[in-house]
Image (spheres, rainbow, N blue to C red):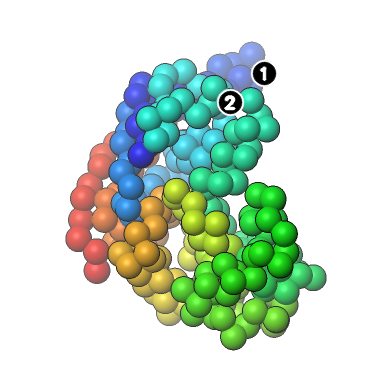
């Protein structure tokens, strides 16, 4: 699904050219559940942004579904990103004044659907994450774990090719983190959702089928392990 070969990326800071990604080659298949680990400043966020069609300023080859996605203009790339990638963030990033249903419908509305067409898809996504009964509530009426479930429902509602989860348990206590990781694992195994998860947490990474460790802009190691 994703094939990167010889990816190099540089940032210009004042007079200095900083080498952020160093000759990265990487393959991610459909239906994988992959953890991307590494210390702050390791380049993992830059790598994820490149994979997610957010940053095309690099040298090397990136093929998505066999095609060079970054050859598109910004508008077409933005449409591809909306259709292909679901994002889950540490801070949930829900809109406070919108109901849960309205929050989850956003990617579909961006994609050109009418509000009335979104309802069944939204309810189906909320059922998959176990909070269909909260559809009419506002985010502040929910716990952190429930808000993250809403964010996951929003990420999967448009049936994207893959999900990027950036420190999805970073703002949650350990018990809730386990619930969210179990949910990701179930979505991966039962719904065949492809998940790329950025994490500092080895306990969360243990749920993934493979771990990619990034350090100083290079892939240090790729480990395959059996989920807990």
Answer with the quarter of the image where residue 148 lies: bottom right
Circle 1 residue: 14
Against 43, residue 169 (above or below) is: below
- Residue shown at 52%/72% (left/top)? 124
**Is residue 22 visible to us here?**
no
Against 91, residue 84 (above or below) is: above
Within 10 angstroms of label 2, few (less than 14), some, or many (20 or more) residues?
A: few
Q: Residue furthest top?
A: 15
Q: Which mark is residue 72?
A: 2
Marks 1 and 2 sit apart, C-alpha to C-alpha, by: 30 Å
Q: Nearer the viewer, mark 1 or mark 2?
A: 2
Against 78, residue 16 (above or below) is: above
In this image, 76 relative to 44: left or right?
A: right
* Numbered disc 1: secondary structure: loop
In this image, 93 relative to 29: left or right?
A: right
- Residue shown at 35%/39% (left/top)? 1
Expressed as whole percent of the image width and height from the top left, the position of residue 143 reads: 60, 80
In this image, 74 relative to 214: left or right?
A: right
Expressed as whole percent of the image width and height from the top left, the position of residue 86 reads: 53, 53
Within 10 angstroms of label 1, few (less than 14), some, or many (20 or more) residues?
A: few
**Is residue 102 visible to us here?**
yes
Q: Earlier in the sequence, mark 1 or mark 2?
A: 1
- Residue shown at 48%/41% (left/top)? 48
């Amino acid at each position: 699904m994703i094939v990167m070969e010889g990816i190099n990326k540089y940032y210009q800071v004042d007079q200095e050219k900083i080498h952020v990604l160093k000759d990265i080659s990487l393959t991610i298949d459909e239906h994988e559940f992959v953890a991307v680990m590494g210390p702050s400043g390791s380049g993992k966020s830059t790598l994820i942004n490149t994979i997610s069609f957010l940053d095309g300023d690099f040298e090397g080859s990136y093929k998505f579904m066999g095609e060079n996605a970054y050859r598109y203009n910004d508008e077409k790339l933005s449409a591809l990103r909306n259709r292909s990638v679901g994002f889950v963030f540490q801070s949930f990033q829900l809109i406070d004044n919108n109901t849960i249903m309205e929050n989850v419908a956003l990617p579909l509305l961006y994609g050109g659907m009418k509000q009335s067409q979104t309802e069944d898809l939204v309810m189906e996504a909320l059922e998959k994450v176990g909070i269909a009964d909260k559809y009419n509530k506002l985010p502040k009426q929910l716990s952190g774990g429930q808000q993250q479930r809403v964010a996951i429902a929003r990420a999967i509602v448009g049936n994207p090719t893959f999900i990027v989860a950036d420190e999805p348990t970073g703002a949650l206590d350990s018990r809730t983190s386990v619930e969210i990781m179990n949910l990701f694992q179930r979505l991966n195994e039962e719904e065949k959702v492809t998940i790329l998860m950025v994490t500092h947490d080895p306990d969360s990474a243990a749920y993934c089928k493979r771990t990619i460790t990034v350090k100083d802009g290079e892939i240090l190691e790729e480990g395959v392990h059996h989920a807990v």
